[in-house]
Image (tube, helix red, strand yellow):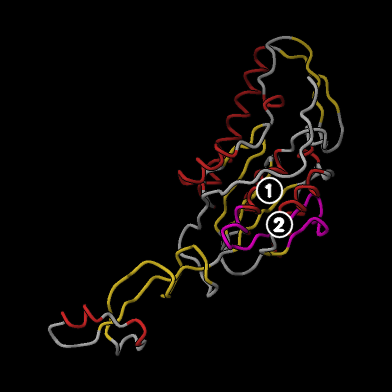
Amino acid sequence: MSPAPARDGPPRFDLPYRLFGRARGVATGGHKALGQGANGAFLRHASLLEQPDARRIDMRASLLDPFGGLKVRRFEHRARIDVFVVLDLSGSMSFRRDGQGEDPVADLCAAIAHAAIRSHDRFGLIAAGPEPLAELGVRATARRGVPDELWRRLSAEPGAGRGSRGLLAAVEELPQRRALVFVVSDFLMPQAEIEDLLGALWRHDVAPVVVRSSAVEAPPPRFGLLETRDLETGRRRLLVMRPSLREKWIAHARARRAALDESFRRFGRPAFDLVDRFDADAFADHLLTGGA
């Protein structure tokens, strides 16, 4: 099968993400925030003494007050948030990301960037493999050209190197203020490293995205020779597959995913599975039903 033709730019979608809990900040935006302001929904009336702002006096409510007090309208505060992608670019993330067709990881990151900037939020990206990749990072910004630039850079950077410990060092660059953080990885690192990474993001709203390949995860045959290759080291291994080994293989994969899901529930939200290609409709449905 020939590769899909390369596109000229990233996909553009308005994604329905939201921050769990209330945002903190004074910059006007679209998310419910702590405190009160003038750009959100009506909350309640207060006395002029409690809220000394003559511009918000409600004459009708004041006339109906049996005590003759002046009533002022109070509104909820809606603020801007920061939306970050923490991206694993270790060698295992390079599968089928060769710049010859659609790149699901680049498409996803560019779509998140586009949606955040369209929503008047700020977008940032932190990338790492064995070491932080500062040259691929994006500081929190609302600049409109970022999605296209990011898509081109990530399409040319499939991932390399062994291990993803650099992610743990890189997340120290995140702001102190609570942000929505999409962690994009195949999560094939040891479970202890996953726990360390998610634990380091404790102050943020964490939304995991598990990058998967249906070809890699297809169940092995019951009998025959099977060659495996480690994408991070290039090491190849030849296995003689038999029913008992196949059952252990499948059971191990299920147990590992169950452990992943349990970690995601403890540290953030349910994960979105990015399988083979970026499906914007499926991602939007995930966000609407509790993913973000």
Q: Which residue is mark 2?
A: 125
The secondary structure type at the circle numbered 1 is helix
Q: Is residue 119 a member of the stretch shown in magenta?
A: yes
Q: Residue 49, percent across and down?
A: 29, 90
Residue positioned 77% across, 14% down in the render? 240
Q: Quadrant of the N terminus?
A: top right
Please, what is the three-letter code of the amino acid marked with disc 2? Leu
Of all residues, the one furthest to the top in this rendering is 223
Q: Is residue 229 magenta-colored?
A: no
User: Label 2's element?
Assistant: strand
Residue 141 drawn above or below residue 6 = below
Residues 261 and 9: in front is 9
Rendering coords of residue 47 (x, y %): 27, 85
The kind of residue tagged 1 is: Cys
Which residue is rendered at x = 55% and y = 66% of the image?
A: 80
Residue 135, disc: none
Which residue corresponds to mark 1?
109
Q: Which residue is rendered at x = 64% and y = 53% of the image?
A: 114
| Depth order, front residue of 213/231 | 213
- Chain part drawn in magenta: 115-138
Q: Upstream in the sequence, badge 1 or badge 2? A: 1
